[in-house]
Image (cartoon, grey):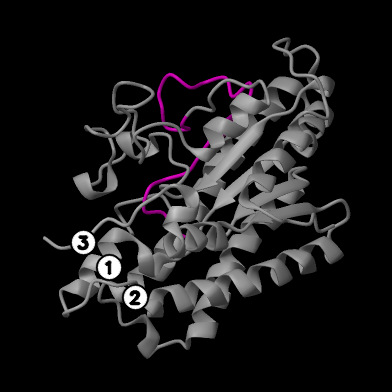
Amino acid sequence: MKIPNLHFLFLIFTAVFFIAQSSLIDDVSSPEKRLAFFIFGDSLFDPGNNNFINTTEDFRANFTPYGESFFKTPTGRFSDGRLVPDFVAEYANLPLIPAYLDPHNKRYIHGVNFASGGGGALVETHRGFAIDIETQLRYFKKVERSIRKKLGDWRAYNLFSNSVYLFSIGGNDYIVPFEGSPIFDKYTEREYVNMVIGNATAVLEEIYKKGGRKFAFVAVPPLGCLPHIRLVKKAGGHGSCWDEPSALVRLHNKLLPGALQKLADKLQGFKYTVGDTYTMLQNRIDNPSKYDLRHIDLEV
């Protein structure tokens, strides 16, 4: 079942609609009325998992100015404040969903966040520096086993079928080829994109087997306009948006809905939505004054 999407915020309210279908209570003895929020992905969603892995500073956000506008201290989020999953949780009357690797997170009452800054759909993407989607899936399966042991098979399955699964994945996979990787010596662009999407949808099928039915994705944003990508291009004499990475992303965003629809056709009860972050951000880059923004000169 495809849920129509007109604006990125629709993603949030769709997820909230899913979450709000049942009452949220703290009594674990009534799991038939309970649901949770599970988050997978990269730095757009990472609440601090990378704080707890052996990685470099480039893949951490545990220093200022991160966190200064809301938390008043760095939390590991790649933001000065909250991330999209934090707002979704707030609107759904949930607490902030904690990082899976946070040693203080043991109960998983309201869900858990597996996202990792730098993580990708491919194991090779930033291998050794971030947590890829397949590893995030393994973490989810550990959580699923823990909850199933506590609640029993039927109640656990009911919990997972009521819950929402939010993804932001693919961006790092499409940055890597422009960081010196010779990947396109081996694959065409379409083959590479299909590999990324194939890995992501394989994860969805595994979650579906555990009861998952409600999935939300954010499209990959226009990577060629990210400041550090523009600065890479500037080293070659320019500073404008780099179209090659964005073209790869556009192909991904074009093919992803079709792959999700194939799952919806095959898997009974599978529901999905895709938030169009690409168009949302590109519109703001192209028309900043319309959104009360201004261009920032990249000259250094």
Does residue 121 appear in this view? no
Q: Amino acid at mark 3?
A: Leu
Q: State the CA–CA distance, disc 3 to disc 2.
A: 14 Å
Nearer to us in this view, 124 or 40: 40
Nearer to us in this view, 123 or 78: 78
Numbered range of the magenta stretch = 99-121
- Asked whether the residues under the numbered discs 1 and 3 touch, taking CB atoms below 8 Å apart as contact, a structural biologist would say yes
- Asked whether the residues under the numbered discs 2 and 1 touch, taking CB atoms below 8 Å apart as contact, a structural biologist would say yes
Which of the two discs, 1 and 3, labels the residue nearer the N terminus? Answer: 1
Q: State the CA–CA distance, disc 1 to disc 3.
A: 8 Å
Does residue 135 appear in this view? yes
Residue beneath the point at 34% across and 72% down:
241
Q: Amino acid at mark 2?
A: Trp
Query: To which residue does mark 2 refer?
Result: 242
Which of the two discs, 2 and 1, labels the residue nearer the N terminus? Answer: 1
Q: Is residue 127 left or right of residue 22?
A: left
> Extreme left residue here?
300
Nearer to us in this view, 157 or 43: 43
> Extreme right residue here?
268
Which of the two discs, 3 and 2, labels the residue nearer the N terminus? Answer: 2
